[in-house]
Image (tube, helix red, strand yellow):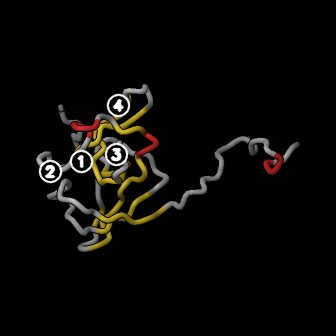
Amino acid sequence: MRTAERGTPPPRGRRPDRRPRWGFARVVGASMRPGLSPGDLLLVDYRRGPRPGDVVVARLADGTVAVKRAVEPRTTASGRAGWWLLSDDPAVGVDSRHRGPVPQDDVLAVVRARAWPRPRAVRGRRGARRTV
């Protein structure tokens, strides 16, 4: 049997994920009010995939990294898997209504909790599917 060091894939099963599991993100704008405010520090999970209703950290088409709510899976213009991301306050910020679906690879992390101030779990909204 050849080893992975020689360029062959590892044995069956999942490859070890080299990304860190946990990290932090800070809310900058007011687009996620009233649930999240500018300055909130968020605990994020880099390895968990998003589900409808989750708050996520994503890279938008212009390169901006933003906190948004994942509403539903969509297909991008290039045919890749993606997510429709919206602000909780539709009058503030830029989201998929302006830029279209965000590719799956650009959804960087799922927010699990607000670490500061007033620590609490951040949960997805029931009925997060909204018509646009």
Mark 1–mark 4 CB contact (< 8 Å): no
Q: Earlier in the sequence, mark 3 or mark 1?
A: 3
Residue 86 falls left or right of residue 74: left
Q: Please state which of the two labelled residues, at mark 4 or mark 3, is closer to the viewer.
A: 3
Label 3 and label 1: CA atoms lie apart by 27 Å
**x, y percentage for residue 131?**
18, 32
Instruction: Calculate the distance from the C-alpha at mark 2 to the C-alpha at mark 3.
Output: 17 Å
**Of callouts 1 and 4, the N-terminal one:** 4
| Quadrant hosting residue 14 | top right
What residue is shown with label 3?
62
The amino acid type found where label 1 is placed reads: Arg
- The residue that appears at 44% across and 64% down in the rendered structure is 23
Q: Identify the residue position indicated by label 1 in the image.
A: 125
In the image, farthest residue toward the front: 62
Residue 112 pos. (x, y %): 36, 59
State the residue position of label 2. 92
4 or 3: tag closer to the N-terminus: 3
From the viewer's side, name the closer residue of 84 and 11.
Answer: 84
Above/below status of 50 relative to 21: above
Query: Looking at the picture, which amino acid does disc 4 mark?
Result: Arg
Question: Comparing marks 2 and 3, which lies closer to the viewer?
Answer: 3
Residue 104: x, y in percent? 43, 39
Quadrant for residue 35, please give it.
bottom left
Where is mark 4, residue-wise? Answer: 74
Task: Kindly report the distance in space between the C-alpha atoms of the residues bearing marks 1 and 2.
Answer: 19 Å
